[in-house]
Image (cartoon, helix red, strand yellow):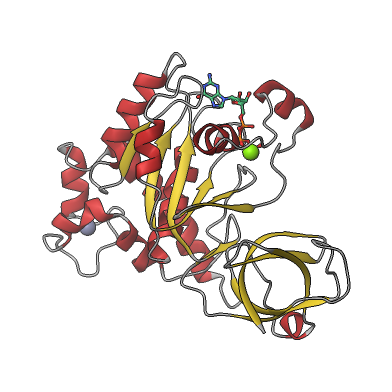
Amino acid sequence: MMEGVIVRGRGGFYTVRDEAGQEYVLRAKKKFRRQKVTPLVGDRVLFTPGEGKEEGKEEDGWVEEILPRVSQCPRPPVANVSILCIVVAPAPEPDWMLVDKLLIFAWKQHIRPLLILNKADLPGAEEAAALAKAMYAGAKVDVLCVSAKSGENTERLKACLSGGVCCFSGQSGVGKSTLLNALFGLSQETGDISRKIQRGKNTTRHAELFSFGDIRVIDTPGFSLLELDEVFDPVLLRDYYPEFAPYENACRFSPCYHGSEPGCAVLRAAGEGAVHPARLERYHILLAECRQAWRERYD
Ligand SMILES: Nc1nc2c(ncn2[C@@H]2O[C@H](COP(=O)(O)OP(=O)(O)OP(=O)(O)O)[C@@H](O)[C@H]2O)c(=O)[nH]1
Ligand SMILES: [Mg+2]
Ligand SMILES: [Zn+2]
């Protein structure tokens, strides 16, 4: 058997790239379905290549084993990511709740997040960048302002991407594919925002992994809805807000959800501006959702 990485998957066929850069189109063994395991882009796999077919068309080959995953994102569904690049832009208007949820997924999976504000050339970019930095400084999330169009900071971004698989994710139209095209000279399809809204569709339809020396990046389709679909004890939610940590021991109650408890040090810190009020407000919305899902978990 050979070893490789799934670089794309379409209609039940998986393209696997081996160490030498050779690609094989394979099907997944039936046992994966029985095990309720879906092969994902980024998976390291063992495979048997097909025989007697032209290059790239070895459709009688098989993905035999999926090697243990280091991480697995529910959305976008990719495996073995070590850096999650969350891309936002002044247009389309940033959905910060989506960013918060992606941060929770990243930290749960021990993936390092990086917040990228693209389209720094557009009006409103400075305000959006200032807001992002203010909101996420306490959580120690790096914010990098770039422009795929003008090339501003693209070299700095590139320098952040080596040493692991980086997944570009975020809303449709923020410029994920345009950025990767600019960074690596790719020619992936990109689409203008008004057309996207009319069609209600993504330009990028499938996740794909690209390698450039020691840099590996995954481009993914944008999305706007993200559920915290994994039900977990609401008391754990606060662990994904690193900016709460310095205050937590000072709360009157233990455990404290930092909801509306009297003597809550996190609420006090937010009142004093030490925790960003918008982050706390969105945390409260997620906490309510999380509590409801937890109550209904056996229904
Ligand atoms: N002004 C400006 N426009 C940009 C920049 N980067 C991307 N765009 C434009 O934004 C639009 C959307 O870009 P895409 O790269 O298709 O966006 P995407 O995030 O890949 O979208 P999906 O594939 O649908 O998820 C295109 O019209 C791009 O030309 C930028 O830095 N500045
Ligand atoms: Mg795209
Ligand atoms: Zn508290």
Image quarter of residue 156: top left
State ligand 1's quadrant: top right
Residue 185 location in percent, x, y? 57, 35
Location of residue 248 by image quarter? bottom left
Q: Is residue 83 left or right of residue 247?
A: right
Q: Confirm whether residue 118 shows in the render.
A: yes
Which residue is drawn at the image coordinates 60% and 42% (left, top)? 224
Residue 149 location in percent, x, y? 51, 21
Q: Is residue 66 above or below residue 57?
A: below
Given residues 103 and 177, the one toward you in this image is: 177
Query: From what the image shows, is residue 156 above or below residue 265?
Result: above
- Residue 32 in the image: above or below residue 294: below
Q: How many marks?
A: 0
**Left or right of 222 in this view: 272:** left
Residue 34 in the figure: left or right of residue 213: right
The foreground one among 56 and 236 is 56
Please name the residue shown 80% across and 83% down the image.
30
Determine which quarter of the picture holds residue 15. bottom right
Q: Can residue 263 be seen from the camera position used here? A: no
Quarter of the figure with the C terminus:
bottom right
Q: Residue at x 40, y 48 (%)?
A: 161
**Could you tell me residue 151's position as x and y percent?**
44, 24
